[in-house]
Image (cartoon, helix red, strand yellow):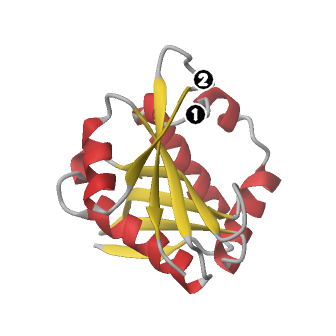
Amino acid sequence: MRIRRVRKDESERLRQVRLRALAEAPSAFDSPLEDEREFPAELWARRAAASAAGETAVTFFAEDQGDYVGLVTGLWEVEGPGRVMIVSMWVAPQARGRGIGRRLLAAVVDWARERGARQIDLWVTEGNDTARTLYEKAGFVPTGERAPLDTNPSLIGAKLSLPLGG
């Protein structure tokens, strides 16, 4: 099992893994699969390049014997100076329970600390107790903010934050 940053030349792989995540766990994301399927190749190329550069965004893959079984994406200063927002986190069903989610989160936390972030935020769909437990074990705490998902207003997201100090 290897956790590594997406490379600039992996736009198609990024697209494939992201679409796989959206198809497998649509209620965990606030982005519709149908929309992202239609994104142009240039958008995926920009995302891969931004991740490889690591200045404003980062995506890490979890790779297991040639299969891509997880990903996480963090965006720099989405909600203000010194803050990172985790906007995508997924582990394939066959790979769950092996610590991959913890390792993906740790990769983003390390990246955020290297950049001087003071806080990491994320949203988790209420009822996704496995993900919420993972986040809370990693030190994320509820902020009290809740909002319906744009893609399915019957589902509610809860915001969690991890203070990093600094």
Q: In the rendered structure, which amino acid carries the disc numbered 2?
A: Thr
> Which residue is at 43% across, 74% downward?
107
34 lies left or right of 148? right
Q: Would you name the residue on which mark 1 appears? A: 30
Real-space Cα distance between discs 2 and 1? 6 Å
Name the one closer to the observer, 122 or 66. 122
> Which residue is at 25% across, 48% downward?
133
Residue 31 in view in this figure: yes
Q: Quadrant of residue 48?
A: bottom right
Q: Which mark is residue 108?
A: none
Q: In the rendered structure, which amino acid carries the disc numbered 1?
A: Asp
67 lies left or right of 160? left
Residue 154 at x, y percent in the picture: 49, 14
Cβ–Cβ below 8 Å for labels 2 and 1? yes
Residue 17 in view in this figure: no
Q: Would you name the residue on which mark 2 appears? A: 151
Number of marks: 2
Vertical placement of residue 130 versus 81, above or below: above
Q: Residues within 10 Å of mark 1 (few under 14, many from 20)?
A: many
Name the one closer to the observer, 163 or 9. 163
> Which residue is at 75% across, 41% downward?
39
Vertical placement of residue 27 versus 88, above or below: above
